[in-house]
Image (cartoon, grey):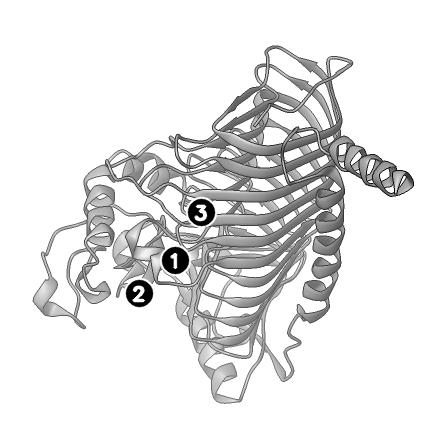
Amino acid sequence: MIRYFLSIFAFSLFLISCSTNVGSSFTVKDAQDKEALGWKEKDKILSRIIAPIIEGKQYNIVDFGAKNDTTFDSRAAILRAIEQCTNDGGGMILFPKGNYFSDGPLHLTSNIQLHIEEGATLFFGDNPEKYLPMVKVRWEGTVCWNYSPLIYAIDAKNIVLSGKGTIDGRGISWSKEWRALQKPDKNRLRQMGNDLVPEDQRIFGNGISEQFPDYNDSTEHFLRPTLIEFYQCENILMEDLTLKNSPFWTVHPVFSKNITIRRLNIKGGYLNDDGIDPDSCEDVLIDDCKIETVDDAISIKAGRDQDAWERPGSKNIIVQNCLLKSGVNSFCIGSEMSGGVENVFIENCTIAGGTHALNFKCNLDRGGQVQNIYFRNIEVGEIEESLFIFRMDYHGYRGNNYPTKFNNFYVSDITCKGVANSPFKIIGIEGQDIERIYLNNITIEQAGDQSQFEHTSDILMSNVKVNGEKIKAPAN
């Protein structure tokens, strides 16, 4: 009997020693087991993300009238090639070496490969009237009708953008001029989302819709288009291209599934030039990309506020082998994440710098839940503010009280040269703790300030060093 009680006592001590947070039911052993199970799930997700292969003939745009000339509008010729390819059941639209100007958007259909070979550049114009009629998009997390993205598809399957050439959005004038004018339209659209105004009444663009004339206001609006937006599409591949100078977000798949994005070189242009933003997407691989932007390099999104609560969220997203450099956040989730984000895996990446390395952002308008997020093997350079930050007070707050739930984050094997301010800034709100964060094998060589933890529970730390010293997790 004595041996029995001693064994129970020893086992109890073992359980206590597994957890940095005394009194918590979430132990280091629990975290390690769940982390291992998560990475096994990542392998299952990866096995079912299959890039499409487009079969069929090759359609050289020059044969349809396109010219190697940055002033000649080759759009009509490109659209003729796309139409012929579509009528024949699909194939490759070839941009041979040269410079091609499209004064307006390119809309893709199923079973189309747009191949821009090395030495070829596709340029776009910046006249808004050329991006009409309006199409359905999701603009900063709210669905509406707006000017067409520069490359767009809706309800299509098997789409490929490939080649070692360049797509140049020439979006600087949009970004500088329209961004200064967009606030009234942005506020109007967000209120429409808040009030659940039917999608087909949300008319922006030039305010004139032939499809829904009852809701025209004949007023010019200033919501910028994205460079590439695939809406409700399946089986997407984007590879090898250089993308630059987007008017707004660069790569923006929305409500789409089975997406492979690999070996892209993305160069931002101006503010709000996010690199890759999967938005309410499922089964996404982002691999071996180099992204340098003023705004977020990669941001996982899932819609804004009430407009997203009954729509799909984002899940099963893998980011690996990428080089990220941003003026603000190298990798983030949010701030549009109201439909929920889960099962995200980031590994073997280099973060060259920025204000924050890993940022999870929302405000009390958002609601939603972000959970089951896994990081490992991340090398970080010099960061201005924080290596790892959760914030519930992101700008644009409109006065609601729908706190987001953040839980189950597993972060292992991170090295960072330096953080100017707080290495970790994990701040929930009263009544909604940020829960179950496991930080393991993290080294920050230099930090200028103390970490901040408020309204958190079950924060575990194992071998976390800042300025050469191990730090402890906050008490529950």
Q: Is residue 168 visible?
A: yes
Instruction: Give the residue at x 45% y 31%.
Output: 428
The residue under label 3 is which amino acid type?
Trp
Query: From the viewer's perspective, is residue 24 above or below residue 132?
Result: above
Measured as percent of width and height from the top left, residue 418 is found at 68, 18
| Residue annotated with mark 3 | 249
Q: Do callouts 2 and 1 mark residues in contact (Cβ within 8 Å)?
A: yes
Mark 3 or 1 closer to N-term? 1
| Residue annotated with mark 2 | 135
Q: CA distance from mark 2 to mark 3?
A: 16 Å
Residue 348, quarter of picture: top right
Query: From the viewer's perspective, is residue 101 above or below residue 95?
Result: above
Instruction: Give the residue at x 46% y 55%.
Output: 279
As helix, strand or loop, the secondary structure at mark 3 comes to loop
Q: Do callouts 2 and 3 mark residues in contact (Cβ within 8 Å)?
A: no
The residue under label 1 is which amino acid type?
Pro
| Residue annotated with mark 1 | 149
Q: Which residue appears farthest toward the top when viewing the image? A: 448
Q: CA distance from mark 2 to mark 1?
A: 8 Å
The residue under label 2 is which amino acid type?
Val
Instruction: Give the residue at x 37% y 63%.
Output: 311
As helix, strand or loop, the secondary structure at mark 1 comes to loop
Mark 2: few/some/many CA within 10 Å (<14, 14-19, 20+)? many
Mark 1: few/some/many CA within 10 Å (<14, 14-19, 20+)? many
Q: Do callouts 3 and 1 mark residues in contact (Cβ within 8 Å)?
A: no
Residue 56, quarter of picture: bottom right
Measured as percent of width and height from the top left, residue 21 is found at 65, 29
Measured as percent of width and height from the top left, residue 216 is found at 11, 61
